[in-house]
Amino acid sequence: MNKAQLIDAMAADAGISKAQAKSALDSFTNHVGSTLASGGRISLVGFGSFSVSERAARDGRNPQTGAVIKIAAKKVAKFKAGADLNGKL
């Protein structure tokens, strides 16, 4: 399912226009992004939780030359599915 299909499904389920559904989805994604950017965590009981994880710096290899390269440390978004979501799979 892509974003447009999700907007269509949200609009149909909630009985709202596609523009309102798009606005709601955009608001959700913006708030998740800004919360994670500030180091926060979002928990949606039964659905799952979004958090930030830090990856340490490490050495990697260029697959063409075999040369060792430095991979910088970085923060990544992480999602852990909740019990209700796992039960539907």
Image (spheres, helix red, strand yellow):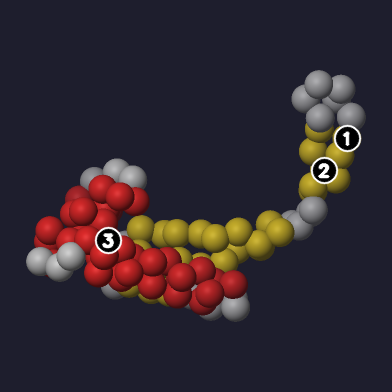
Picture residue at 22% right of the left edge, 61% below the top = 18
The circle on residue 68 is 1
Q: Which residue is more in the foreground, 62 or 12?
A: 12
The residue at the point 66 percent across, 62 percent down is: 75
**Reading the chain from its start, which is encountered first: label 2 or label 1?**
2
- Work out whether residue 7 can be spotted: yes
C-alpha gap between disc 3 and disc 1 = 41 Å
Residue at the spot 38% in from the left edge and 66% down from the top edge: 26
Percent position (x, y) of residue 53?
60, 63
| In this view, 84 is above or below 65 | below
| Mark 1, secondary structure of its residue | strand
Tag 2–tag 1 contact (CB < 8 Å): yes
Tag 3–tag 1 contact (CB < 8 Å) = no
Q: Amino acid at mark 1?
A: Val
Residue under pointer 2: 59
Q: Which residue is mark 3?
A: 83
Image x and y of residue 68, in percent: 88, 35
Three-letter code, disc 2: Asp
Question: In terms of image quadrants, where is residue 16?
Answer: bottom left
Tell me the amino acid under the disc marked 3: Ala
Q: CA distance from mark 3 to mark 2?
A: 36 Å
Quadrant for residue 45, please give it.
bottom left
Q: Is residue 71 left or right of residue 5?
A: right
Q: Is residue 87 visible?
A: no
